[in-house]
Image (cartoon, rainbow, N blue to C red):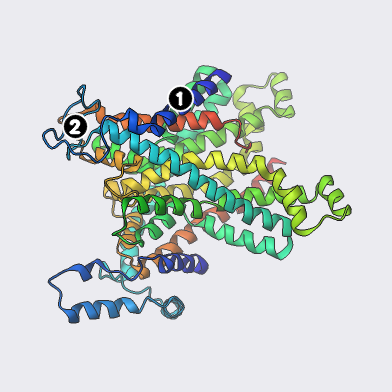
Amino acid sequence: MKWVRVIAIAFLVTVSTACLLAEFVARAPYEKQFREAPDATPSRQHLLGTDDLGRDRFSRLIYGTRVSLLLAPAAALLSSLLAGLIGGAAGFAGGWIERTVMAATDLFLSLPWLFLLITVRAALPLNVSPMVSVIITFALLGSLGWAAAARVICADARVLCQSDMVVLARASGNGGFRLLWRHILPNLKPVLYAQFWISVPVFILTEANLGMLGLGVAEPLPSWGSLLRDLESFSTFSPEPWRFVPLILLIVMLGCFHLAVQKQEPSL
Amino acid sequence: MLFGGFLGATLVRVSPGFGVDEQELDSRLSHESIASLRQANASDSHLGAFYLHYLRRLLHGDLGTSRTLHQPVRQLLADRFPETLKSVGVGLAVGWALGLALAVATVMSRSWSVDLFSSLIAGVLLCLPAAMMALLFVIARAPGRLVLGLIVFPKVFYYSRNLLERSAALPHVLAARAKGLGSARVFLWHILPASGPQLLALAGVSVSVAFAAAIPVEVLCDLPGIGQLAWKAALGRDMELLVNLTMIITMVTLLANSAGDLLRNPVRAGAA
């Protein structure tokens, strides 16, 4: 199934490139209102029509995808780094430190993540700018999403600490920070990479959930959450199938992510 | 559980917008009314004092009063918890029935078309946000409770398929097949006992997944459960309600995981 993976990666690269070049690909700025054409059907000027405020849906899709595709990896990087630091240090230290850190991790894991996010996100100020709301949303995702990865990394660090290589390094006089920095952390890189790639689609989905509950990225900046929220006004009496394009793109993108990272994921 | 409640309260308390009440923006309110609103909110502002006060009341069986809904928290929970239990129960039943049935069919048939079909369905559902699925059900006027089943299903399917595939490749299972045992007998006597303990662990995790998904589903499908209550409490920054909800959700998750762990050992011993 190598060719399926290649197609998935090619699709991801194409969409990501198009989104990075949004200024050239999109026909209008995402916030520009075409007041003479609200709720317009697809045309040569507006490929996916316009929303009820007269904004070009295609432009909003391109910019919204860019927001999600840039910031979900940033949040995944933050959570992977936190997991690496917390889990790696706990596994390396062992003893009561490891037990305490793992107890805190278990506590975090016993609370549904979405519940925590909604709780904290809702308590944030309401009058923040769209850009700040994007940063807050994804920073929250990154800073609250480390627990599951920390457990895996802690277990790996513990195994690594008992390996012949580390025992030899200790016997050669390496200890403390040097041992952690030169021998443990570099060997945890594959697990960290895997955790990073697993987290990206999870964060994209979580942002979409938050956005649909009105707690994601603030208007007028689009994100997948706010694009999907547009479907709330969908009516079966006057169906407009082009409004499902963001949903289809989200499914295809996440499907491609899952296919692309399949080899990265650790076994059960 | 108490730590869980405390963690929830701490996260809300340290958030920068805590203590800001939208009611203060109401131009019809006088200075005295705004001052009394601020005074009412000030009682929650010191986290340690709030939590000690809360614990003292908890010992007397008093869970406090919701600031936003103006009702005793105990009453709110008693009204809404059964609704969520019903939704989660239906969701888990549907999710497990579908997931396990397709996983068993995939492993036992050993057909690539069955595998492709079931993986495609589970893959698409895995890529759909829970809130979107709930919205699609609202548009289609389908019962909202089923959404939880479709959220649990792909996780159950992938995990159990991988487990069953691994068990089906064990040497003693291959030997049983080679000796001519029927498919049903091989599955019931050899594959299932080897996968049982891990499947029970997954049962605990799936309860947590269903409870988390209940929040967007209940909000969008307008189901009056504790998921919807949690959303209202979060939007209203209602500390009393949030602490109690955090504790209840922690309790349910811990109970589900502990039950899975407790059942796992006898099953593992039986399989051995």
**From mark 1 to mark 2, how far is it between C-alphas?**
31 Å
Q: Earlier in the sequence, mark 1 or mark 2?
A: 1
Please tell me in which quadrant of the rendered image residue B188 appears. Answer: top right
Answer few, some or many: residues within 10 Å of disc 2's Cα (few below 14, many 20 plus, some between 14 and 19).
few
Q: Is residue B177 left or right of residue B103?
A: right
Q: In the image, is residue A247 above or below residue A183?
A: above
**Circle 1 — which element?**
helix
Say what amino acid the circle numbered 1 marks: Phe
Residue at the image position 88 percent from the left and 53 percent from the top: A171
Query: In the image, residue A173 lies at what x, y percent?
Result: 87, 56
Q: Looking at the picture, tell me which residue is in the foreground, A171 or B151.
A: A171
Query: In the image, residue A68 lies at what x, y percent?
Result: 40, 40
Query: In the image, residue B203 lies at what x, y percent?
Result: 53, 45
Say what amino acid the circle numbered 2 marks: Thr
> Which mark is drawn over residue A11?
1
Query: In the image, residue A42 lies at what x, y percent?
Result: 20, 25
Q: Which chain carries label 2?
A: A
**Quadrant in which the C terminus of chain B appears:** top right
Please tell me in which quadrant of the rendered image residue A232 appears. Answer: top left
In the rendered image, which residue does mark 2 sit on? A236
Q: Looking at the picture, tell me which residue is in the foreground, B251 or B68.
A: B68
